Amino acid sequence: MPANTSATDQLRHLLNTPGLITMPCCFDGLSARLIEQAGFPLTFMSGFATSAARLGMPDTGLISYGEMLDQGRNICAAVSIPVIGDADTGYGNAMNVRRTIAGYAAAGFACAMIEDQESPKRCGHTRGKQVVSRQDALTRIKAAVDERESGSDILIMARTDARHDHGMQEALWRCQAFADLGADIIFLEAPHSREEMQQFCTTIPGYKMANMVEQGDTPLLPPAELEALGYKIAAYPLTLLSSAVQAMQEALITLKAGKDAGNLLPFAELRKVIGFDAYDDLLNQYPQATPKSQ
């Protein structure tokens, strides 16, 4: 695609290309860059992972719109692949939702996800979450779509958590209503079986996302099976965060025992991943001024 293609147009192209999109999720600029360097065409700023990495706090509505926006701006600037942003409940009423969508578009996100949980929201695979009424849920999605239609260059992902307390029929009703309102991608959180996943994909039109949380409520199906069911995107929201936490814990245990941390990424490779080599190559294009004699 042309170098100046917007992130949103890049995502549209991916959605229109045959095949499932495997999408590891990020939480900061470095994790996003690693995803891009590994060859993945798309990433998602996970609210769970971002709250954990930025605040050291759980995904229970504690992280604010401003903090998510700031983190997202850094993530989008760190990569050239499109990024989907977790916009939670939209952070207020319909006008807050519109402001959130406009802000995410200006930050560089290709898509923003709005969900129907009550505020403060919770991670979709934890207990205690509740959803708002049908009317309030539809109002949020309509406001998001209206902001997109008013000129914000961004796609809208609509999410429902209604399966948890209200069952599949209510969840499917909301998914269909979100699609009817013009949401670009539909996300039914935490179906409990392969049969429910199949029902979702068969019943609801348009692009659909599966959320593959290790040890979560939804069966962890292989990509080929997800594609066969009818999903377009397979998100892995906690894989990188969990891997990073485990590796850091193991390194800390080793150091506390008075030993060398051992089999780490070579320093030269770490510098390269972070961007020191690219920085130095660019810097060398600019001659340094010679200090004047005193």
Image (cartoon, rainbow, N blue to C red):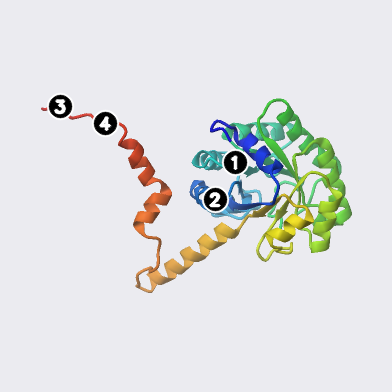
Q: What kind of residue is marked 4?
A: Pro
For residue 68, which numbered disc appears in the image? none
Q: Crowdedness of circle 3 by 10 Å Cα count: few (<14), some, many (20+)?
A: few
Question: Where 108 falls versus 170 (above or below)?
Answer: above
Lower position in the chain sequence, tag 4 or tag 1: 1
Q: Nearer the viewer, residue 158 or 283?
A: 283
The alpha-carbon separation of the residues under discs 1 and 3 comes to 47 Å
Task: Please name which of the two marks, 1 or 3, marks the residue nearer to the observer.
Answer: 1
> To which residue does mark 3 refer?
292
Question: Residue at horizontal 75%, vertical 54%?
Answer: 189
Where the C terminus falls, by quadrant? top left
Lower position in the chain sequence, tag 3 or tag 2: 2
Give the structural element (helix, strand or loop) at label 2. Answer: loop
Q: What kind of residue is marked 3?
A: Lys
Q: Crowdedness of circle 4 by 10 Å Cα count: few (<14), some, many (20+)?
A: few
Give the image quarter of residue 267. Answer: bottom left
Give the structural element (helix, strand or loop) at label 1. Answer: loop
Lower position in the chain sequence, tag 1 or tag 3: 1
Q: Nearer the viewer, residue 134 or 289?
A: 289
The alpha-carbon separation of the residues under discs 2 and 1 comes to 13 Å
The alpha-carbon separation of the residues under discs 3 and 4 comes to 15 Å
Q: Please give the count of numbered marks on the rendered protein.
A: 4
Q: What kind of residue is marked 2?
A: Gly
Can residue 126 be spotted in the picture? no
Q: As drawn, is 122 to the left or to the right of 108?
A: right
> To which residue does mark 2 refer?
39
> To which residue does mark 4 refer?
287
